[in-house]
Image: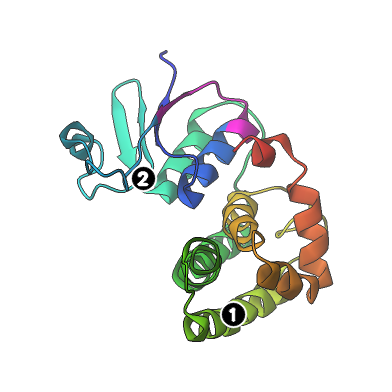
Amino acid sequence: MTKPILYGADYSVYVRIARMALAEKGVDYELVPLDIFAAEGIPAWYLEHHPFGRIPAFEHDGFRLFETGAIARYVDEAFDGPALQPDDRRLRARMNQIIGLLDAYAYRAMVWDVAVERLEKAAPDEKLIAGALKQAETVLKVLASLKAEGPWLLGDQLTLADLHAASIIGYFLKVEEGRKLLARFPVLQDWCDRIVVRTSFSNG
């Protein structure tokens, strides 16, 4: 069996999710650096791996995948190691709900409209940031309401929902507004303090 290959860049939230899944399963893999924002553009060969030119893409024994959710689920099911998806159908549905809401409502607001806008723009759009912070607050309220008793979002089992949330919220915490907002939700702050010290997060 060949070593799986992950194509992507360190700066990507979604590449980090896939890397965290691989790390939590203890999978040795090759990361092929790919900067989709490079001046020369996306290399033509990469479109065979991801026809839309996004990252990450994944390959294992000739089997190719793109879309982070599909990659993370495949990694969990194809390799030995601790399960990252619950057996219980309701918990699994909750996991997928959390991942879905993070993709739909958190990623753009927290990552691009707050963190990237604040960190990378010479003249940040304060109106855009303010609106995104309201959206982020709603996301955190909902996430706190959905969190089960226990160390992780679904309780005692670390799941793909935790990896998804850690990558998106971790980027949000690069800016002061993000850190202040998260601190208003102690249950999520405790969860965050727990996950950011995991090797999969620090090396992702």
Alpha carbon of mark 2 to alpha carbon of mark 1: how far?
A: 26 Å
| Callout 1 amino acid | Leu
Determine contact: label 2, label 1, CB under 8 Å. no
Q: The N terminus appears in which quarter of the rendering?
A: top left
Classify 161 as above or below 110: above
In this picture, residue 132 sits left or right of residue 9: right
Q: Quadrant of residue 142?
A: bottom right
> Pointer 1: what residue?
133
Q: Residue at x 38, y 42 (%)?
A: 56
User: Which residue was labeled with disc 2?
Assistant: 55
Residue 195 in the image: state x and y as whole percent: 74, 49
Q: Is residue 52 left or right of residue 89?
A: left
Label 1: few (<14), some (14–19) or many (≥20) C-alpha neighbours in 10 Å: many
Q: Amino acid at mark 2?
A: Ile
Image point (79%, 64%), residue name: 189
* Residue 149 appears in the picture as rendered: no
Q: Position of residue 146 (x, y in %)?
A: 69, 72
Judged left or right of residue 155, residue 9 is: left
**Mark 2 Cα-neighbour bin, 10 Å: few <14, some 14–19, many ≥20:** many
Q: Which residues are drawn in magenta?
A: 23-32
Q: Where is residue 71 drawn, in percent x and y?
A: 42, 41
Which residue appears at 22% of the width and 41% of the height?
Answer: 40
Give the residue at x 40% y 31%. 33
Quadrant for residue 43, please give it. Answer: top left
Element carrying mark 2: loop
| Quarter in which the C terminus is drawn | top right
Establish if 126 lies above or below 155. Answer: below
Q: In screen coordinates, is 40 left or right of 169?
A: left
Q: Secondary structure at mark 1?
A: helix
